[in-house]
Image: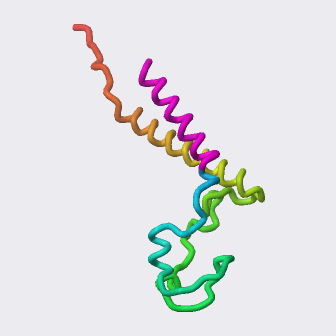
């Protein structure tokens, strides 16, 4: 019983963080993006204005047009709702995949056979 409560509370905390707190994440480039953009200059709207850097050779991935690309839901105009729902869906999909995997590899009681 304690395990189920622990997992439920953990899931609720993850859903809250993904749905609400994710909207307050920094819009500045993370460490990898900063290194890739080193040598280039960008304006306030994040358009490249000069220089040469590794970012010049980047391309969109095959999943760039997917429904959950760029930390949002395609087609939702409200940025906060889009980011929040995307985070919640990500948590639910990850929890479902992880729970399914644990369910598949769980220990099972040995089957008793009658002699």
Please report the residue visible at 35 percent of the width from the left and 30 percent of the height from the top.
106
Residue bounds of the magenta highlight? 1-21
Relative image position of residue 84 (x, y in whole percent): 65, 49
Relative image position of residue 61 (x, y in whole percent): 54, 71
Please report the residue visible at 70 percent of the width from the left and 59 percent of the height from the top.
74
According to the image, what is the colour scheme of the structure?
rainbow
Q: Is residue 13 left or right of residue 110?
A: right
87 or 96: which is nearer to us? 87
Residue 98 drawn above or below residue 65: above
Extreme-bottom residue of the structure: 51
Residue 53 lies within the magenta run: no
58 or 21: which is nearer to us? 21
Residue 104 drawn above or below residue 64: above
User: Which image quadrant for residue 26?
Assistant: bottom right
Residue 15 drawn above or below residue 81: above
Please report the residue visible at 41 percent of the width from the left and 32 percent of the height from the top.
103
Q: Is residue 111 left or right of residue 40?
A: left
Magenta span main SS: helix
49 or 77: which is nearer to us? 49
Which image quarter holds the N terminus? top left
């Amino acid at each position: 019983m304690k395990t189920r409560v622990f997992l439920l509370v953990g899931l609720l905390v993850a859903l809250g963080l993904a749905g609400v707190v994710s909207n307050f994440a920094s819009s500045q480039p993370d460490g990898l993006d900063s290194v890739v953009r080193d040598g280039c200059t960008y304006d306030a709207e994040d358009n490249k204005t000069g220089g040469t850097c590794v970012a010049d050779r980047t391309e969109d991935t095959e999943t760039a047009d997917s429904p959950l690309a760029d930390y949002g839901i395609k087609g939702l105009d409200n940025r906060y709702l889009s980011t929040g729902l995307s985070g919640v869906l990500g948590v639910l999909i990850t929890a479902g995949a992880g729970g399914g995997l644990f369910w598949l590899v769980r220990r099972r009681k040995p089957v008793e056979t009658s002699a």
